[in-house]
Amino acid sequence: MINSIRGFNDILPPETSIWQHIEKEAREIFETYGFSEIRVPLVERTGLFSRSIGETTDIVEKEMYTFLDKGGESITLRPEGTAPVVRAYIEHKLYASDPVAKLYYLGPMFRYERPQKGRFRQFYQIGAEAFGIDDPMIDAETLEMLVSLFQRLKLEGVILNINSLGCKECRPLYKEKLINFLKDKKPGLCQDCQRRFEINPLRALDCKSKTCIELTSLAPSLLDSICEGCKTHFEKVKEHLSLYKIDFHLNPRMVRGLDYYVRTTFEITAEGLGSQNAVAAGGRYDGLVKDIGGPDVPGFGFAIGMERLVMLVKGQRQEAEGMGQGLVFMAMLGEKAEKAAIPLMKTLRSNGIRLERDYGSKSIRSQMRRADKLGAKIVLILGDDELASHSITVKDMESGEQEKVPFEKVEEKIRALLTERQKVMSKQ
Ligand code: HAM
């Protein structure tokens, strides 16, 4: 027996239906906000990630699946989606006719992290990137789109944390201030923060180590140090979030683990996820397109951690609702009935009704057991009696009620029962 690799998961039915449900809702919502899907490769040249995410980040230093291919080139399984999407935006000159491009993506990412609850080595993201818009309104609007998705999925207890990281002008000044403040405390910082002290001291602000938290507790605030341009941008983002009636929590110590961010950054956290509590995160990355060799085009985006989102949706008992129609089971007694049912099964399925059956001419009891096991909401029974009257017995498995319905009316009856069920469930 060869097992799967640690941190790489199979996603099995029925859970896959939750994944499909989320993906469908995300696609629908994102398209209504003007985003279109982009599909980029799983593998890129290593330099793309080290240059964009940053040489001293955990991702680049420790977590990338990097190897030499047979031609001796260093390639990397994508640890995130932003850099590949930026690369594609530049490579295909998507900016040529209009710098504004709104793109979304779904798919697996790879990071060599220590697997635990909510953290895997292959994990899935749904992400969106908006290029070419400086206006802070796009920050707020994209966040609103994300929040709408979470609302559509009926998530409760999610918190939007926002911060501004300043820009290439004002952040270096803050960095100096912070280095001065932390200089004599450096020996007490954790090893990672000590190592990153000169290049990326800001990471110490949201380091989880207890001593780093203590030593940085009185550090000067980044939000007090950003320049006027960044302040105005951030004020507008907050104003527009309020106009959208989106609650947020200001977290001036939130520093993201990727270096490309400037100005607005955010994380959405949720209860019930344990220590890996960020279900989505992102921010603005003006300058990244230029750094990777494109024109000076700004960007704003986010990515949702699918496994974490699925955990939340599952935790909130929503599998059944919105998961498409309930299952219908076709029970047939005898070869004649099996043959007579074929055109009906074909019609129902091609009209989008999920229909299962059993094989091998089993007894009615055995077929009913199977229907029960599969969680069928409705069972259609076709035996000699029904054949004689060109009808079908339709049994509502919940109420136990059953009714003989003419062949032509079966679909109508099924739809009525399923709609009734959905209504009851959405009231619950
Ligand atoms: P990130 O914060 O590295 O940002 O990842 C975004 C989300 O992916 C996290 O909040 C989390 O839900 C999920 N995630 C990350 N690592 C793992 C893991 N090992 N296992 C399970 N889930 C994980 C980015 O990736 C940026 N590209 C987001 C972005 C897009 N910024 C701008 N545009």
Image: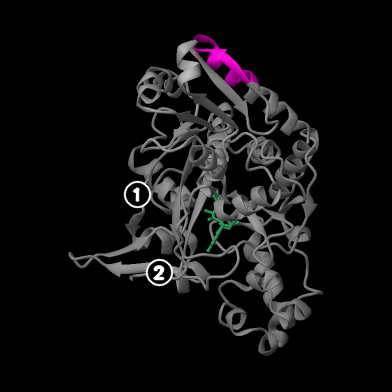
Question: Please, what secondary structure does the residue beneath circle 2 have?
Answer: loop
Q: Quadrant of the C terminus?
A: top right
Residue 304's disc number:
none
Horizontally, is 212 left or right of 37 in the view?
A: right
Q: CA distance from mark 1 to mark 2?
A: 22 Å
Up-down: is 141 above or below 113? above
Q: Is 95 drawn above or below residue 304 in the view shown?
A: above
According to the picture, the residue beneath numbered tag 2 turns out to be: 5
Answer above or below: position of 191 versus 227. below
Of residues 261 and 38, the one drawn nearer to the viewer in this rendering = 38
> Cβ of disc 2 within 8 Å of ligand 1?
no
Locate the N terminus and report the quarter of the image it occupies. Answer: bottom left
Q: In this orientation, which residue lies closer to the viewer: 424 or 231?
A: 424
Q: Position of residue 333 (x, y in %)?
A: 44, 28
**Is residue 171 rendered magenta in the image?**
no
Amino acid type, callout 1: Pro
Query: In this figure, which residue is indicated by the disc labeled 1?
Result: 41
SS of the residue at dot 1? loop
Residue depicted at x 30% and y 69%: 67
Q: Who comes first in sequence, dot 1 or dot 2?
A: 2
- Within 10 Å of disc 1 (Cα), the crowding (few <14, some 14-19, many 20+) is few
User: What residue is at 56 percent from the left and 82 percent from the top?
Assistant: 195
Residue 59 lies, in percent from the top left, at: 49, 67
Q: What predominant SS class does the magenta segment belong to?
A: helix
In the picture, measured across the screen, residue 125 lies left or right of residue 51, that is right
The answer to the question of whether label 1 and label 2 lie on touching residues, with beta carbons closer than 8 A, is no
Q: Residue at x 58, y 80 (%)?
A: 192
**Furthest residue toward left:** 71
Report crowding for label 2: few under 14, some 14 to 19, many 20 or more residues within 10 A (C-alpha).
few
Q: Is mark 1 within 8 Å of ligand 1?
A: no
Magenta-colored span: 403-416
Q: Amino acid at mark 2?
A: Ile
